[in-house]
Structures are given as structure tokens and as C-alpha cells.
């Protein structure tokens, strides 16, 4: 089986390939947020820490913009599971 650049995994969390990023750009995606919505790249547990720069470089290359002009996607802090017990304890200190 012959592999191409398009087979390279760009976003490990969401298993998004370079080919999928390129297709999104070819179909009209011009921002990091648009690529993120179309492909889910950058929406995994790392929130784009491993793929954001790779996607920005590809977007800049395909659109002819400098990387500095490729606006970063909306960054949200990683989520962490919260137990029901932790939530139940909120405010207990005030009640005592």
C-alpha cells in the first residue's frame, strides 16, 4: 500500500489527516475555526496543542497568506471530569 502526504495524521486526537485538511481548504474553508468545524481537528482532549500549528502552516501555504495572518482558532481550556461529590461540596463551607 502506497502512502502519500494526504495520509499523514495531523490531529492525533481526532484522527484527522492532512488530506482532510486540504479538502476542507479546497472546499472553501479559509480560517482555523472553519477547518475545525468541518474536520474536528483541534477539538480533541489536547484542544489543538499538537495540530494547531500544522493546520495554520497548511492553511497559509494553500491560501498564500503569511502564517502570522492566519488567525488562531477559538481556544478553549481543556475539560476535566468533575465528580458529583465535588459539586455537592460546593457551598458547604459557607453553610457551616
Image (tube, grey):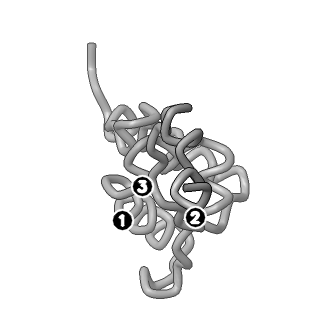
Label 2 – label 1 distance at C-alpha: 10 Å
Check disc 2: other Cα within 10 Å, few if <14, some if 14-19, many if 20+.
many
Which of these two is toward me, 93 or 19? 93
Which residue has dot 3 on it? 48
Residue that carries the numbered disc 2 in the rendered image: 32
Packing grade of label 1 (10 A; few <14, some 14-19, many >=20) is: some
- Label 3, label 1: how far apart the Cα atoms are: 8 Å
The residue positioned 51% from the left and 46% from the top of the image is 41
**Residue 55 left/right relative to 75:** left
At 43% from the left and 62% from the top, the residue drawn is 58
Above or below, comparing residue 47 to residue 65 in the picture: above
Instruction: Rate crowding at label 3 as few (under 14), some (14 to 19) or many (20 or more) other CA atoms within 10 Å.
Output: many
Q: Earlier in the sequence, mark 2 or mark 1?
A: 2
Place of residue 54 in the rendered image (x, y in percent of width and height, measured from the top left): 35, 59
**Label 1: element kind:** helix
Q: Separation of disc 3 and disc 2 at Cα?
A: 11 Å
In the picture provided, is 51 more to the left or to the right than 82?
left
Q: Quadrant of the N terminus?
A: top left
Disc 2 to disc 1: CB gap under 8 Å: no
Residue 32 lies left or right of residue 78; in this view the side is right
Q: Earlier in the sequence, mark 3 or mark 2?
A: 2
Whether label 3 touches label 2, CB < 8 Å: no
Q: In the image, is 3 to the left or to the right of 52?
A: left
Rendered image quadrant of residue 17: top left
From the top left corner, tell me how far across and down residue 87 is, in percent.
57, 42
Identify the residue position indicated by label 1 in the image. 53
Q: Residue at x 49, y 40 (%)?
A: 86
Please tell me in which quadrant of the rendered image residue 45 appears. top left
Residue in the picture at 32% in, 37% down:
8
Q: Secondary structure at mark 2?
A: helix
Amino acid at each position: 500500500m502506497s502512502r502519500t502526504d494526504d495520509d499523514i495524521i495531523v490531529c492525533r486526537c481526532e484522527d484527522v489527516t492532512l488530506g482532510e485538511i486540504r479538502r476542507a481548504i479546497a472546499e472553501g474553508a479559509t480560517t482555523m475555526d472553519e477547518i475545525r468545524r468541518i474536520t474536528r481537528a483541534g477539538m480533541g482532549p489536547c484542544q489543538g496543542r499538537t495540530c494547531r500549528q500544522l493546520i495554520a502552516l497548511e492553511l497559509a501555504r494553500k491560501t498564500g497568506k503569511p502564517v502570522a495572518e492566519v488567525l488562531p482558532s477559538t481556544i478553549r481550556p481543556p475539560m476535566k471530569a468533575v465528580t458529583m461529590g465535588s459539586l455537592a461540596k460546593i457551598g458547604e463551607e459557607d453553610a457551616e
